[in-house]
Image: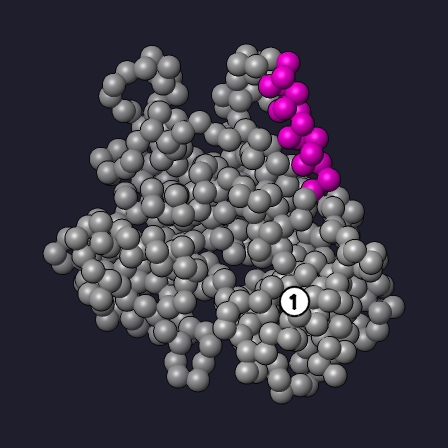
Amino acid sequence: MNSSQAQNISSLADAEKADAADPLRVFRERFHFPKASNEMDIVYFTGNSLGLQPHNARAYVEQELDDWARLAVDAHLHAKHPWLPYHEFLTEQMAAIVGAKPVETVVMNSLTVNLHLMMVSFYRPNEERYKIVIEKGAFPSDQYAVGSQIRFHGGNTDESLIELTPRVGESTLRTEDIIETIARNGDSIALTLLGGVNYYTGQAFDMKTITEAGHQNGCIVGFDLAHAAGNLELQMHDWDVDFAVWCSYKYLNGGPGAVGGAFVHERHARSFDLPRFAGWWGHDKETRFLMGSEFKPITGAEGWQISNPPILQMAALRASLELFDEAGMPALRAKSEKLTGYLEFLIDQIGDERISIITPSSPAERGCQLSIRVRNADRSLHQRIIARGVYADWREPDVIRVAPAPLYNSFTDVYKFAEILRECLN
């Protein structure tokens, strides 16, 4: 939404009118919203931390609990949704969300576990190529995983880690600087691993261009999509990304600790010579229960599975994926750009020097999140808006993150938040 469009939503009544015209408005009614102790209306802008619970999640989980009680072990084959192939019920819908083919997609484990599994296969340092490129200020778990993988291979982060840093006086990275760094160090880079969206600044990276640059310089390219899956329109296959991993408890509304996902490009589908940590659920389905001693991986991303899937977690996630499938990522992304553009406009209209938005203004360089930097790292502003019924989070050292999720947030939410922020600043 550009500024001229945003100006047409100048009152609460205008925001409510915009919601009435929203073709996705029905999805809001399919989620549970928390209630404040004093029954005030709340504004939930922390879907980038934990998504809301879909109404149908309880029924989906209870179905599996009922089948467990009724059938016990026989539910693996005879449940309403048999457990043996249960993870496959999520594959096509998840593949659509990340822009992949089903053979390239698997729902399994948690994000950092999947990241380690991918790096076992795709970070293969040698004397010439041993460096990993990440963004400085990447989510800590990514930093820990990358550092531990470097040390596992006998390296050290001082020599093997390249951290992309914004220019002096800037908060976000420039794509041309990322490309230049890859080109300058290309002969020594084994892996480029960035977040699809930086958790702190909300910057969305140009994954297509970065992947092309990495491949032109002989590097493997992977992405952490924790803040991108369910937020951006992704095209992992078409962008030629080697691998990606993500969690499902943020924008994908899978619930606390929800099962994660992984993407492996189909050109690696039969790369059975790649080293990998093997487990029985990644073994060929036709011979898995013959209990042989020789591991034969499944073709595609499923071949990286280790253990049988957590059914109750997958049931909750399946409830949400069906909503995404019904809404469609193109429509969700279109609404997201309008919501976040409107939010940016209203915050700019406040015109208070104590706050500034560090997330890029271009819709192509962000998802739904805006990161509001607070001068002098004054946390009292965050505490005041929380007391007014806003769910937003503080990230050290000085940022309030707000993320209007298009599946359940509204223009009215955005208007109310901006008014609360204005009043708290005053």
| 36 in the magenta segment | no
Q: Position of residue 338 (x, y in %)?
A: 68, 65
Residue 168 visible in the snapshot: yes
Quadrant of the image for the C terminus? Answer: bottom right
Residue reaching furthest to the right = 13
Residue situated in front as seen by the camera: 56 or 237:
56
Residue 342 visible in the snapshot: no
Q: Position of residue 44 (x, y in %)?
A: 70, 58
Residue situated in front as seen by the camera: 374 or 211:
374
The image shows residue 19, relative to residue 72, as above or below, that is: below
Q: Residue at x 60, y 22 (%)?
A: 81
Q: Residue at x 83, y 56 (%)?
A: 39
The image shows residue 255, relative to residue 198, as above or below, that is: above
Residue situated in front as seen by the camera: 196 or 218:
196
Q: Position of residue 46 (x, y in %)?
A: 63, 58
The image shows residue 63, relative to residue 255, as above or below, that is: above
User: Magenta residues, as a range?
Assistant: 54-70
Name the secondary structure under disc 1: helix
Report whether 9 appears left or right of 396.
Answer: right
Q: Position of residue 3 (x, y in %)?
A: 70, 77
Residue situated in front as seen by the camera: 345 or 103:
345
Q: Quadrant of residue 369?
A: bottom right
Q: Residue at x 43, y 35 (%)?
A: 103
Q: Report the residue marked by disc 1.
A: 340
Residue reaching furthest to the left = 127
The overriding secondary structure of the stretch rendered in magenta is helix
- Residue type at numbered disc 1: Thr
| 58 in the magenta segment | yes
Quadrant of the image for the N terminus? Answer: bottom right
